[in-house]
Amino acid sequence: MGTNARKNKKLSAVLILGIAIRIFVFLFQDPFNNDYHFQVIKYIREAKKIPLAIEMSQGYHPPLYYLLAQIFYAGDSTKGRLKSLQSFSLLTSILTFIILFWLTKRYIQSSRAAFYSALLVALLPQFIAFGNFVSNDSLTNLFGALICLQAYVFIASGQFRHLFLLALWLGLGLLTKATLLAFIPVIIPLVIFVQIIRRQKIITVVVQTLIFCFLFSAFGSYKYLQNYRHFGRPFIHNTDPLVQKATGWPWAESQKGTYKGLSSFLDWNIAKLIKEPTWSESTRHSYFLLLYGTLWYQYIHESNLEGNLTRFKYFGSLLYLLAIVPTIIITMGGIKFFFDCGERLKTKDLDLPFIQKAFSILTFLSTLAMIVFIGYKTDVWSCFQARLFFPAIWGMIVLFAQGLELIEKKARLFSLVRILLCLLFVSFVCYFIIEFLLLLQILPPLTAQKMLFFNWERLKLF
């Protein structure tokens, strides 16, 4: 069997595994997480209008997800009907995974790097869980993946029809969640640059760029115009005092005090998370630890996945420990990208694959920067959640693959890394099995000695 045939066979198994585990989790996962998106869906059905930002805790979001969810919402809150609504998220989650899988198969050249990158996308627990909730996260992730795919196509072709589709996906993404605003500072320079390297006339570059900006703005600006019309500013979120006062629940005040000077940026002590794997005073002031904790484990309690409220939460300690390996690999990929940029700018060797790779990574970094900026500005710890950069997760996968390709050159080191990654991926599957067995009460709950001091039932996150 040839190398490509073996690669395709292994990747096909990962594709089946990724779809199967999403369906498996869907079967027992509660539809709702800490953000009550169902309230907006129900409001639109009953009031026949889109709510203002101050009318409910999630009313600040753009409306596309809630409008499309009407197709799956049967109009009542019985368990079976809510699972039908939740199936919309399952569908978008599977589509997102398929797109990311195809990108991995098509654009990551090393067969081993492609295989482990595909496994990471297939099994990452928080990516799966937040993809399945009744939430706009799942549709946002889909549009993020579509934008990355379409950007790759546009970079390769430079054709206007592909530019139009890029504007469409970006506009619809903005009509779903404001997180995709972070894509704009990367996409607009990309559109200009691709036209320049294809030696388009200056007037053509200007006109097509303006058309692109007009299109995505026309598709995606509804909520921002609504906010400006009613409140005099385009951007409002639920940590805003305006929303907090109007909804009568100033929850954000209890989450302030996150920033503790430079230590909030420089505290990367993962041992704190290993010691206390869920929310704690020792970790909530570190931006890195908040993002690390919410990326690799259920640092915050969500839905009916309650293992982190029991002594099984220390399974999260194992995940944090093993996740040091992919974190280092991603960091190595970032360092490699930084030096590659310097070298290629010096030699002016900016080929299309490098531009595609740079777009993915810069989009991820831009989204990460926006999360840190908003979290710093609001000083609310729940703003630092890894799920917020999942629309740009393809950039993280590209960094992971780059780091793996570096390690591949050292055979013994790669053998060790491969074993550790396999342990991590098996642990991801075990995490969901533990949650499933706890729900069936086959495993004893083993209540944790130290419980969190606030009421999770009342918590509404950013």
Image (spheres, rainbow, N blue to C red):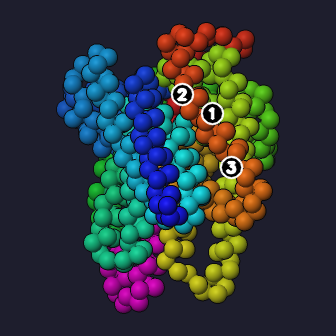
Task: Please provide percent x and percent y for residue 25.
Answer: 45, 29
Magenta segment: 184-211
Identify the secondary structure beneath mark 3.
helix
Q: Whole-percent x and y of residue 130?
A: 47, 36
Dominant secondary-structure state across the stretch colored magenta: helix
Instruction: State left or right for residue 56 relative to residue 351.
Output: left
**Left or right, 279 with reference to 71:** right
Label ID, residue 418: 3
**Disc 2 element:** helix
Residue 383 image position (x, y, % from top left): 57, 39
Q: Amino acid at mark 2?
A: Phe
Q: 415 above or below 203?
A: above
**Within 10 angstroms of label 3, few (less than 14), some, or many (20 or more) residues?**
some
Q: Disc 1 marks which amino acid?
A: Ser
Nearer to us: label 3 or label 2:
3
Q: Name the residue nearer the viewer: 392 or 181.
A: 392
Badge 2 crowding class, 10 Å Cα cut-off, few under 14, some 14 to 19, many 20 or more, is: many
